[in-house]
Amino acid sequence: MATKITWIGHSAFSIQTEEHLILIDPFISGNPVASVDPESLKPSFILLTHGHGDHVGDTVAIAKRSGATVFGNFEVANWIAKQGVQNTVGGNTGGTAKLAFGTVQMTIAFHSSTMPDGSDGGSPNGLYITLNNGLRIYHAGDTALFSDMSLIGEKGIDLAIVPIGDFFTMGPADAIRAVQLLRPRFVMPAHYNTFPPIQQDVFAWAAEVNSKTLSNAIVLDPGSSYELQG
Ligand code: NI
Ligand code: MN
């Protein structure tokens, strides 16, 4: 069965496998481009790349209502637990956690990671996810371009999700270099067109991916999905 990837908007994605709905960075209620009702989401897992409000988003409310397990770095997971969320798992950079849907390795990311209340959010991360069905998804989180993306690419990536918005993260040109290093089968852009400082011409970027890299760009509208085949 195909795995359904939905772009909620900004860095927020959902991954629907046969058994699990997994949310990544569910920034929904304060997100001007997200149209999904956070109340309608019943994930079994929420994965967080770092502590910023535009990534933690609705995590606490959704986890309390759905009973989802929240996975993030040690500081992020502890902060989420302190808000009253029952099930949290805190990893750290380089480590891999085995969860019911597969595994998640916390990769490096070059960014910052303060929690919404200003407390320490540890180190920012990317997430290298291997689903039980074998699909490998890399969500880069918020990051600058870094050459070790080539090491992540060596592991094999079916779908990479990379920020292209510039200003807070790498911009379109560096994101093309990132795709060249990661060499995924498919790539989806994220972290753009949410706010004025991160407006980008996503179709120009996608055309450049298709002409300058071996990967295929997939551009979704917020709320729309792509069926990733194994
Ligand atoms: Ni951030
Ligand atoms: Mn961000």
Image (cartoon, rainbow, N blue to C red):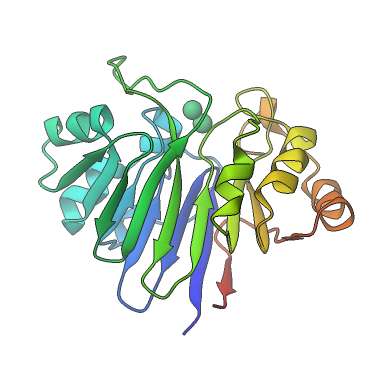
Q: In this view, does 143 lie to the left or right of 3?
A: right
Which residue is at 86% across, 49% downward? 208
Residue at screen point 52% across, 43% down: 11
* Quadrant in the picture for residue 214: bottom right
x and y percentages locating residue 12 in the rendered image: 48, 48
Q: Which residue is drawn at 33% across and 64% down?
A: 102
Give the image location of residue 172, x and y in percent: 76, 37
Q: Name the quadrant of the C terminus.
A: bottom right
The answer to whether residue 70 is visible is: yes
Q: Viewer-proximal residue, 20 or 41?
A: 20
Horizontal side, residue 195 vs residue 70: left or right:
right
Direction right: furthest residue? 211
List x then y, in percent, for residue 29: 40, 42
Q: Of residues 179 and 31, which is closer to you in this image?
A: 179
Q: Position of residue 122 (x, y in %)?
A: 32, 23
Taking the image as shown, residue 65 lies to the left or right of residue 51, namely left
> Can the viewer see residue 33?
no
Residue appearing at x 62%, y 31% in the figure: 195
Report which quarter residue 185 is drawn in. Answer: bottom right
66, above or below 176, in the image: below
